[in-house]
Amino acid sequence: MMTQYKNTHSFLTPSFVMNAMIYTNVIMFFISLVYSGKNMILSFNPFYAFTPSMDVLNFLGASGRFPIVKFEAWWSLITANWLHGGLLHILFNMMALKTLAPLVMKEFGLYRMFSIYTLTGIAGFLLSYFGNVYLTIGASSGLCGLIGASLFFGKSRGGEWGRLVYKQTLGWVVTLILIGFLMPNINNWGHGGGLIAGIFLGWIFGYNEKRRENIFDKLAAAIFAGITYWLLLKSVVQGFFLIYT
């Protein structure tokens, strides 16, 4: 699927972008474990294995009512999308990203995919704040945004391919709802906010058959990427000096 998407830049390919997103998530998870040190939770329970310290996640950019109200950390609406609370958490989310990102890049373009992921992550964590979620992290809000955009695409496009995409993504939505009711500590506010924002942005941005990507799409994605990596780097450097000096 990914080879069907053409990009004029030799290095900025769908594979490069997706791997960069995965590596960023993995690196931030590894740093959170290193910074946690002896406060990291090592458990035989797979749901809690390799769980970083909540304090560490807080200053690395976890979002929710607590960090925003206590520290006015509105920037966490962006950074929380790149942090995870355990080994299973990041494994499931990265497998979902490897499934969703190529589809959205194929139909919306590489740049719009990253913008959708970023903005729907913000929307999910903002709704979590208004929903009084105490502390929240994870790529799920942005992933739900990609699901929402795919859902809009499938319904809007129609035809055999559109119906197939719509049916598959609708199945993911049902799965998300079931998981939200059956499993503890699931941020349904974040999932719902990301999903709704993804549908809305899919409509606003349009997909390739409606409108090709232009310079504004590229500029928006570049700005979002620059802000994201600056905030993540800043939190890592500040955390280093906070812990080791």
Image: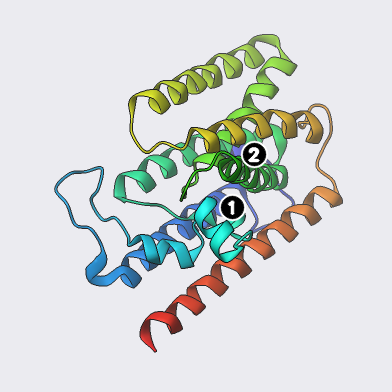
Viewer-closest of 118 and 165: 118
Q: Are marks 1 and 2 in contact (CB under 8 Å)?
A: yes
Which amino acid type is shown beneath numbered disc 1? Val
- The tag earlier along the polypeptide, 1 or 2, is 1
The N terminus is located in which quarter? top right
Secondary-structure class at tag 2 = helix
Q: Work out whether residue 92 can be spotted.
A: yes
- Disc assigned to residue 110: none
Q: Which mark is residue 105?
A: 2
Q: Distance between the Cα atoms at labels 1 and 2?
A: 10 Å
Type of colouring: rainbow
* Residue 60 x, y percent position in the rendering: 48, 66
The residue that mark 1 highlights is 17
Q: Label 1's element?
A: helix
Residue in the picture at 49% in, 32% down:
188
Image coordinates of residue 193 in percent, x first then y, are: 61, 35
**Residue 106 image position (x, y, % from top left):** 65, 35
Q: Is residue 152 above or below residue 82?
A: above
The residue lying at 80 percent from left, 56 percent from top is: 219
With 6 as the anchor, is 215 left or right in this view?
A: right
- Residue 46, quarter of picture: top left
For the C terminus, give its image quadrant.
bottom left
Q: Does residue 189 appear to the left or right of 161 in the view shown? A: left
